[in-house]
Image (spheres, helix red, strand yellow):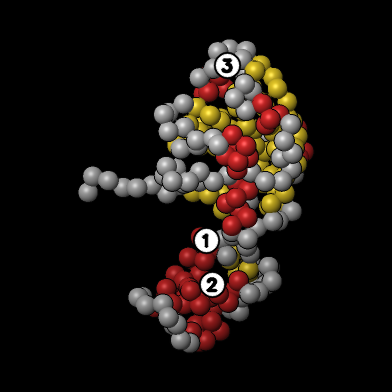
Amino acid sequence: MTSAVSGPKYLSVREHLRRRVSALPEHTLLPPEPVLCAEYGVSRITLRRAVDGLVADGHLVREQGRGTYVTRPAIRHEYRESFVHRIAGFNSVMTEQGAQVGTTVLTQRIVPVQVPVAAELGLEPATDVVELVRLRSVDGTPNHVAHSFLAATAYPRAAEEDFSQGSLYDFLRREYDADLAHARIVVDVGTAAPDEADVLGVIAGSPLLVVRTTVRDSDGRPQVHSFSRLRPDVSQVEFEVSVGGR
């Protein structure tokens, strides 16, 4: 085996295996450990370390009594904390990754704002907001339900736009030249209500990842508040941050 990956031997084996399993159908069983050890010319310890990395990344699954078989990594639902240069919505991020994104609009209306959302948007109680609720899927699998709120006086056309395709953020930039400069993100855990469970294809009471985002303009004024309730079995939330104070 030859590999362009330098460093410890297990890294070369892991990278070669990663490329190999990515071309195999899901649920394909890997050859037994002795066969792979002989093929790659490594010890069992080295092989297991390589396989451990692919299991952790979601490329392989070990099953007692069956062996190790090919799976597919969870869809990476990527958020970046450094939003000054770019705030990208889910549709844009996943499309760039080559995924097929589906959207079903569940609710789209103007309603009086609820107290928690009013606090996030800096609005007076009962101020009208556009409420947009969408079921998002990736490659045909339900991924999350996204709830978005924005002031109706500032963005009235958001109550009428067809959001079954495209990005809310792209719409706001295109139609209103919206200044979406910064975002605050909070992640916690919730459970699926019966209506959510039905559309997400999970059991009521199942755990969900909850990602709350408030997007602000360059002057710090809130523009959009959203919370997404994600299936954790097909989603990951990733942050990239700058580290200072070295």
User: Disc 2 residue type?
Assistant: Arg
Q: CA distance from mark 2 to mark 1?
A: 10 Å
* Callout 2 secondary element: helix
SS state under label 1: loop
Label number found at residue 104 = none
Q: Residues within 10 Å of mark 2 (few under 14, many from 20)?
A: some
Q: With respect to residue 82, does 28 lie above or below?
A: below
User: Where residue 115 is drawn, which disc sits there?
Assistant: 3
Question: Mark 3 falls on what kind of element?
Answer: helix
Indicate which disc residue 18 carries: 2
Please state which of residues 185 and 180 is positioned toward the viewer in this rendering.
180
Check the image and report above or below for 246 versus 38. above
**Rendered location of residue 68, percent (x, y):** 60, 69
Q: Is residue 160 visible?
A: yes
Tell me which residue sits at (63%, 40%) in the image.
171
**Residue 197 shows in the view:** no
- Mark 3 or 2, which is nearer the eye? 3
31 and 130: which is toward the camera: 130
Which image quadrant is residue 224 in?
top right
Q: Nearer the viewer, residue 8 or 128?
A: 128
Cα distance, mark 3 to mark 2?
A: 48 Å
Label 1 vs 3, first from the N-terminus = 1
Sequence-earlier tag: 3 or 2? 2
Q: Earlier in the sequence, mark 2 or mark 1?
A: 2
Amino acid found under the numbered disc labelled 3: Val
Write down the residue under mark 1: 57
Q: Is residue 106 above or below residue 91?
A: above
> Are the two marked residues, 2 and 1, in contact with CB atoms closer than 8 angstroms?
yes
